[in-house]
Image: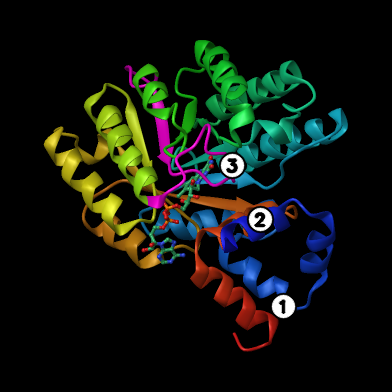
Amino acid sequence: MLRTVILAAARSSRVERLVETAPFTRDVVRRFVAGTTNDDALRVTRQLVDDGLAVSLDHLGEDTVTPEQATAVRDAYLNLLTDLSGAGLTPPAEVSVKLSALGQKFDEQLAYEHARAICAAAAEAGTTVTLDMEDHTTTDSTLDILVKLRSDHPSTGAVLQAYLRRTEADCRELAGAGSRVRLCKGAYKEPESVAFQSAQDVDKSYVRCMNILLSGEGYPMLATHDPRLIAIGEDRARWFDRTPAEFEFQLLYGVRPEEQSRLVSEGYTVRVYVPYGTDWYGYLMRRLAERPANVAFFARALVGRR
Ligand code: FDA
């Protein structure tokens, strides 16, 4: 129920204005977002890389509505990749891209062309790109664009969401050699017709998908903070004889940092997803929707008792 309310608020421009202008917001945002500028992104990336973590940087923004906005997002990624490469932070840092930020909702071809330019810049910088996955109405389009991008840039990564009923089949499609797949639970409000609704069904689907990816020939990226799923991931990786170079765990910036360090100390490859930029509202609201404790944190900040 709370999740539904928060995800509805994520789409409300009135609530967005209220949250963005509230005095407490800065501290809450700082927990989950690296900052607003490339310098902020580079500073946080450097700290994480020095601590033995890999990074995926997300220039915040989604639901772009004009070609000019889409071009600005593309250019932001091109600048970021130049800066990361100049700072010697590639390959440990890659980038995550939302196709909706590149214009997917109004011009799929434009989004593809911008994504291709970002993939080319990433290759030039010695790193790669992962395409974030958004709500289920975009899944087919995103996977179509992925296939086209992979013909020139085979290491381009996909994200599959365990809550979608279709995802086991998508995992089978994408478990081949050279394929990089991030498996997450899924962060959007989806109808029962396309998505499992109970946490238990989502978790079971996650395990089935994980088995397909870990037993396949690609490079699985297990994105979850769930202690049970991480433990199962560790176990299944051993079962399928995966060395730490043959799969990775991924967690979000600001979420369970002690677990991130533990996994690194156990010898696993761990990538932290680091969002940065001014357009943080939708991202923050999805993080709040995931966990009641995050809402409590937000509420305490609201009344000035952080
Ligand atoms: P869930 O939220 O169910 O939490 C399970 C358990 O994990 C909790 O009970 C608790 O024990 C622990 N936990 C979770 N949050 C915690 C916290 N803040 N502090 C302490 N413990 C905590 N989604 C999407 O739709 N498209 C995408 O492209 C991506 N990309 C992506 C990248 C990466 C690297 C990650 C980690 C996640 C995504 N996601 C995503 C988000 C994903 O779909 C999902 O919404 C969140 O990861 C939350 O799901 P969990 O698997 O963490 O479990």
Contact (Cβ within 8 Å) of mark 2 with mark 1 = no
Q: For the C terminus, which image quadrant? A: bottom right
- The answer to which of 259 and 118 lies nearer the viewer is 259
Q: Amino acid at mark 3?
A: Gly
Q: In the image, is the residue at mark 2 within 8 Å of ligand 1 by its beta carbon?
A: no
Q: Position of residue 151 (x, y in %)?
A: 51, 10
* Residue under label 1: 24
Q: CA distance from mark 2 to mark 1?
A: 23 Å
Determine crowd level at label 2: few under 14, some 14-19, many 20+ residues with C-alpha closer than 10 A: some
Mark positioned earlier in the residue sequence (1 or 3): 1
- The answer to which of 125 and 200 lies nearer the viewer is 200
Mark positioned earlier in the residue sequence (2 or 1): 1
For image coordinates 60% across by 22% down, the residue present is 120
Question: Which stretch did the figure color magenta?
Answer: 174-199
* Residue under label 2: 39
Residue 190 colored magenta? yes
Q: Position of residue 25 (x, y in %)?
A: 71, 72
Main SS category, magenta section? loop
Q: Amino acid at mark 1?
A: Phe
